[in-house]
Amino acid sequence: MTARHPFGNDPAKIAGYRAFWDRSPAKRPLVGFSIKSWFPLQEFSASAAWQDSHVLTPDMIRPEEFLDDQERLLQEGEVMDDDILRGASPSQAVPWLDGMLGATLRILPGTVLGVERTLPWQELARLRLDPENPWFRKYVEFIEALVRHSAGRYPVSHGTLIGPSDIAALLRGHTQSVLDLVESPEPMRRLLQQCGDIFRQITEEAWKRIPPYHGGYYDAQYQLWSPGPIARLQEDAAGVLSPGLYRQFLQPVDRDVAGCFSCAFIHLHTNAMFLYDLFLEIEEIRCFQVNYEPHSGGPSMAGMIPSLRKIQSAGRPLLVRGSFTPDELRLMLDALDPRGLYLYIMVGSVAEAETLRPVLGM
């Protein structure tokens, strides 16, 4: 079935995604395999060449130089017999929104990082998304190049963007932005609202330029198709906030942003597990995506299960991304409901995926 469709993008797979969003009865989870790296800078020859420089600038990014490598990566779908559609977005190695907001983009080994700033409140009062910003124009140029080149063969997505708390940390500094919640609560509240507006606007700008794919929308980082407008929320910087501070300052912002997209989902790390209850209070967040990252200091799968069950008990679709041993997969399958469950599994080879298929009931 897979090989008869470019990149394995069989339209029949849409039914599996609809069942995921609806949490329809299922015998097994939705499953996708990928041999892509966790660090996309090196996956494309165009961006691997940036390692010779210290700072990334918009003129260094030529979208057409990414297209051949993009199709090469998408071709894994023609040999992986799984449940997912594969698509593309502007380079996931680029912190696009950081650049649009004036940060220097520092090139580090394997990644690019926006350098945090310490802007005064007076300057932040004028904060807005500038459509004439060179980074904004390059982001749009990249989206439009992908739309043209895909010609409907694969879905195109918004890019990977930092969320409101991350934007505030970028603009005020990670430490100062936390202190501001106590020392300057009203200016910080206004800043977070501005950050939420900017996040919403840049996401909407992408969808103005991307056509629907088989009647739906798409997020390329997790190969997630959705029946309605999608947004990928994240609040990585919130992992150092108390539940009280999150509820007071950030929860209203996340609720407002998620309410603008019928299939909004949130990307989470395990360092924010103590905030999951508060994220779940936001009914507008339709889906939860959690990374499994024990090699980065996160808990084992056994330690994650209670939090994953909590998400499912709240009636939300759950997407778990990570590399898993057969025993870890068995633990998840035994502990979790297959309804509304999507496992996006990072593997080292097609052969590794084949060893996991029987465990998954495929």
Image (tube, rainbow, N blue to C red):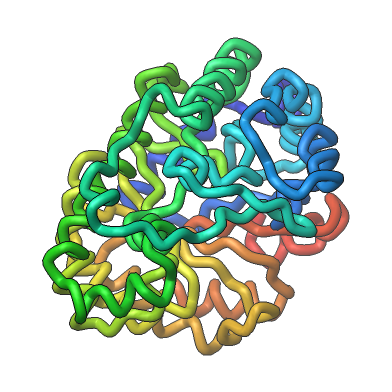
> Taking 94 as reference, is 184 above or below it?
below
> Taking 309 as reference, is 225 above or below it?
above
**How many marks on residues?**
0
Looking at the image, which is closer to me, 285 or 174?
A: 174
Image quadrant assignment for residue 296: bottom right
- Say which residue appears at 44% left-offset and 55% top-offset: 26
- Say which residue appears at 16% left-offset and 56% top-offset: 190
- Say which residue appears at 83% left-offset and 58% top-offset: 348
Q: Position of residue 3 (x, y in %)?
A: 76, 27
Q: Position of residue 328 (x, y in %)?
A: 65, 78
Looking at the image, which is closer to me, 1 or 288?
A: 288
Q: Position of residue 129 (x, y in %)?
A: 33, 35
Instruction: Look at the image and tell me in which quarter the N terminus lies.
Output: top right
Instruction: Look at the image and tell me in which quarter the C terminus lies.
Output: bottom right
Residue 84 visible? The answer is: yes
Q: Position of residue 220 (x, y in %)?
A: 55, 39
> Taking 124 as reference, is 100 above or below it?
above
> Taking 243 as reference, is 343 above or below it?
above
- Say which residue appears at 25% left-offset and 58% top-offset: 121
Image quadrant assignment for residue 263: top left
Looking at the image, which is closer to me, 119 or 319?
A: 119
Residue 258 visible? The answer is: no
- Is 326 left or right of 261, judged from the image as shown? right
Looking at the image, which is closer to me, 149 or 212?
A: 149
- Is 319 left or right of 295, judged from the image as shown? left
